[in-house]
Image (tube, helix red, strand yellow):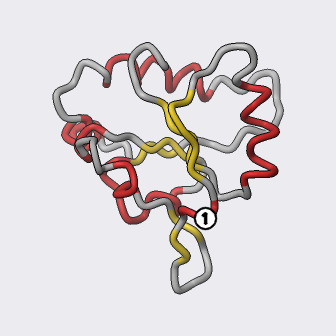
Amino acid sequence: MCKRYELVIYTATDPTYADRIINRIEFPTKYFSFRLYKQQCLRLPNGMLCKPLELLCTNRDINNIIIVDNWPISFVLNVSNGIPVRSFTGSQSDTELLELAKYLKELSNEESVIEKLKRDLIF
């Protein structure tokens, strides 16, 4: 996907924990432009964390930002940009991300990802 999109890791965990995992994913090839962590999340009144996409909008169009997350509360402030996925359980038969890749390739040809997501009623 890094050939079609700018990829950013946005996790609700601490950098110390997250970086160990991300560094293994990115070795030897770097896929992600940058990383956002728990410190960049917003704590909701109920104590849950969400990931406001406005942090990414200083030089990007919000209409072309997608958040893929297994925890829909993560994109509660930007529901139109969200694609929910099932949590990975470690099963070798889990093809969630492979199926998502097909859709993301199609989505990369759209002028506005938000409009396409709305038409497809992803969330």
Task: Using a 10 Å C-alpha cutoff, classify the residue at mark 1 as few (fewer than 14 neighbours), some (14 to 19) or many (20 or more).
Answer: few
> How far across and down, in percent of the image, does residue 115 sit?
19, 40
Is 107 rendered above or below residue 53?
A: above
Q: Residue at x 58, y 69 (%)?
A: 49
Horizontally, is 123 left or right of 7 in the view? left
Q: Residue at x 34, y 57 (%)?
A: 54
> How far across and down, in percent of the image, does residue 41 sit?
54, 64
Between 12 and 59, the one nearer to me in the picture: 59
Horizontally, is 63 left or right of 25 in the view? left
Q: Which residue is mark 1?
A: 39
Residue type of the residue flagged with mark 1: Gln
Q: Residue at x 81, y 50 (%)?
A: 17
| Secondary structure of residue under mark 1 | helix
Is 46 rendered above or below residue 18?
A: below
Horizontally, is 41 left or right of 81 in the view? right
Is 27 rendered above or below residue 83?
A: above
> How far across and down, in percent of the image, does residue 117 sit?
29, 39
* Callout count: 1
Between 37 and 97, the one nearer to me in the picture: 37
In the displayed orientation, state which residue is furthest to the bottom: 45
> How far across and down, in percent of the image, does residue 76 sit?
42, 64
Is 117 rendered above or below residue 111?
A: below
Q: Residue at x 38, y 40 (%)?
A: 66
